[in-house]
Image: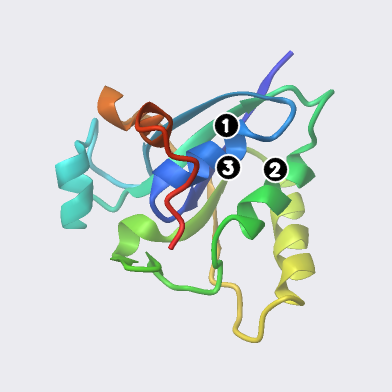
């Protein structure tokens, strides 16, 4: 049995690699979610007028990795105190966001944010939103860094 989780943590390329390296994760797809434009393109999302965030949809085996562990990975993979940006990437498409499917995920996300807040002086800006439609990014974005022989795109 598998489950899915969806996170936005800035540019999706590095976040994809991070989650692919988590034991128990069986697939990661990059895409867009949380906006109003159906089937958005990368160019549309980059303009910042679709409302979508760059996200990863993580498919995982709950018997091997917990949702809590995925939340920890997410909160450790980026700076969740930044509002609508990560490093040089600026815009609402780079916001920190967890899309939750139910009340259990909502509660787990709230507890994870509270737990990780202790590491930061600034407040965590991560949004916790209801599940949204996932629109896969174009094929050339899938495993973008792996295709180029890169391990990360961290600054």
Please report the residue visible at 75 percent of the width from the left and 53 percent of the height from the top: 107
Q: Quadrant of the N terminus?
A: top right
10 Å neighbourhood of mark 3: few (<14), some, or many (≥20)? some
**Residue 43 x/y as whole percent:** 15, 44
Q: Secondary structure at mark 3?
A: helix
**Would residue 43 appear left or right of 97 to someone viewing this image?**
left
Q: Which one is earlier in the sequence, the residue at label 2 or at label 3? A: 3
Q: Secondary structure at mark 1?
A: strand
| Residue 70's disc number | 2
Residue extending farthest right: 63
In this rendering, the answer to whether 9 lies above or below 63 is: below
**Would residue 59 appear left or right of 54 to someone viewing this image?**
right
**Residue 47 x/y as whole percent:** 15, 55
Label 2 – label 3 distance at C-alpha:
10 Å
In this rendering, the answer to whether 41 lies above or below 71 is: above
Please report the residue visible at 61 percent of the width from the left and 80 percent of the height from the top: 123
Residue extending farthest bottom: 121
Q: In the image, which is nearer the foreground, mark 2 or mark 3?
A: 3
Q: Which one is earlier in the sequence, the residue at label 2 or at label 1? A: 1
Q: Quadrant of the C terminus?
A: bottom left
- Please state which of residues 142 and 153 is positioned toward the viewer in this rendering: 153
Which residue is the site of mark 3? Answer: 18
Which residue is the site of mark 1? Answer: 58
């Amino acid at each position: 049995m598998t489950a899915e989780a969806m996170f936005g943590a800035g540019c999706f390329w590095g976040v994809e690699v991070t989650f692919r390296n988590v034991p128990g994760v069986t697939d990661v797809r990059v895409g867009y979610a949380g906006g109003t434009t159906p089937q958005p393109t990368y160019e549309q999302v980059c303009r910042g007028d679709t409302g979508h965030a760059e996200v990863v949809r993580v498919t995982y085996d709950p018997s091997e990795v917990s949702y809590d562990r995925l939340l920890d990975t997410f909160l450790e993979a980026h700076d969740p105190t930044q509002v609508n940006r990560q490093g040089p990437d600026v815009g609402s498409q780079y916001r920190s966001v967890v899309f939750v499917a139910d009340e259990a995920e909502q509660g787990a996300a709230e507890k994870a944010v509270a737990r990780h807040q202790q590491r930061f002086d600034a407040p965590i800006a991560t949004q916790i939103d209801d599940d949204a439609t996932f629109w896969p990014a174009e094929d050339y974005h899938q495993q973008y860094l792996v295709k180029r022989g890169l391990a990360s795109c961290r600054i």
